[in-house]
Structure formats: C-alpha cells, structure tokens
C-alpha cells in the first residue's frame, strides 16, 4: 500500500500529523507499505536484510513527486488530498476509487495488463 499525504497540515495539530496515518491500514489488514520505520536502524523493529524501494524515494514526505509507475508496486493507495486533486487522481487509468470521502480516499491500483503476445 502506498500512502500519499498531499495535505500535509492540520488546522488542529502542529507538524505533519498524517505522515504515517496510512500505517493503520497495515495494522488492520497487513501488507507492505511504501514507508516504514523498520528501515531505520534506530527502530525497535528492523528488517534483517535491506529491502529495495523501486518506487520514487520518500513519497511519504513528498507525495507530489508520485509518478504513474510508482503505483505498479502496490495494490492500494491511501490518499489525503483536496477534491481537485482527487479528481485528477481518479482520472488516472491505474487508479479506481473505492471510497469517495474527502480528504482521505482509498484507491485500488489496477494491475498492469500483460503485453500482447507477439506472433511467431
């Protein structure tokens, strides 16, 4: 699951309160996230082996850098955005909105279609 926070601020809480909000989905449903504290040596729990991140680096901090190819590594996207930005995301062929509330929405990432077979 990729978590994208385009809003980044709250009028009620200082700092970046939504930075790791999508991690609750992992707690409830399992899966792999685009960002995890387990990648940091100072964490209480760490990966035994370093895992590569083929998607755009640090999307949890800079959601605006997301590219279509980044979605290929995930089944779902949890997105915190404005209505206008959600309209843009919904227009992407790879994304199918599963919820329609604002500011948070869940998108299903449609699997890439296999390339057509070449005639022999």
Image (tube, grey):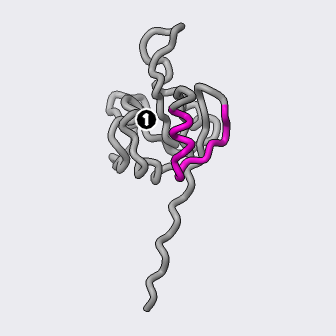
Which quarter of the picture shows residue 22? top right
The residue tagged 1 is: 36
Q: Position of residue 111 (x, y in %)?
A: 54, 58
Residue interval drawn in magenta: 85-100
**Nearer to us in this view, 16 or 95:** 95
Q: Is residue 29 visible?
A: yes
Residue at 52% x, 65% y: name it.
113
- As helix, strand or loop, the secondary structure at mark 1 comes to loop
Total tally of numbered discs in the picture: 1
Q: Position of residue 88 (x, y in %)?
A: 51, 39
**Nearer to us in this view, 88 or 99:** 88
Is residue 81 found inside the magenta-colored segment of the image? no
Q: Position of residue 26 (x, y in %)?
A: 57, 37
> Is 115 placed above or below 48 here?
below
Is residue 94 found inside the magenta-colored segment of the image? yes
Residue furthest out toward the bottom = 120
> Is 36 placed above or below 31 here?
above
Q: Is residue 75 visible?
A: no
Label 1 packing within 10 angstroms: few (<14), some (14-19), many (20+): few
Which image quarter holds the C terminus?
bottom left
> Is 15 placed above or below 109 here?
above
Residue at 41% x, 52% y: name it.
69
Residue at 52% x, 40% y: name it.
89
Q: Position of residue 33 (x, y in %)?
A: 48, 41
């Amino acid at each position: 699951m990729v978590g994208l926070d385009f809003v980044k601020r709250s009028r009620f809480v200082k700092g970046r309160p939504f930075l790791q909000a999508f991690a609750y989905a992992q707690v409830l449903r399992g899966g792999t996230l685009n960002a995890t504290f387990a990648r940091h040596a100072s964490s209480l729990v760490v990966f035994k082996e370093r895992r590569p991140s083929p998607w755009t680096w640090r999307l949890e901090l800079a959601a605006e850098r997301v590219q279509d190819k980044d979605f290929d590594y995930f089944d779902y996207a949890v997105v915190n955005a404005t209505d206008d930005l959600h309209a843009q995301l919904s227009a992407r062929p790879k994304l199918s909105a599963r919820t329609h509330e604002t500011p948070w929405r869940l998108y299903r990432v449609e699997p890439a279609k296999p390339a057509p077979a070449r005639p022999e």
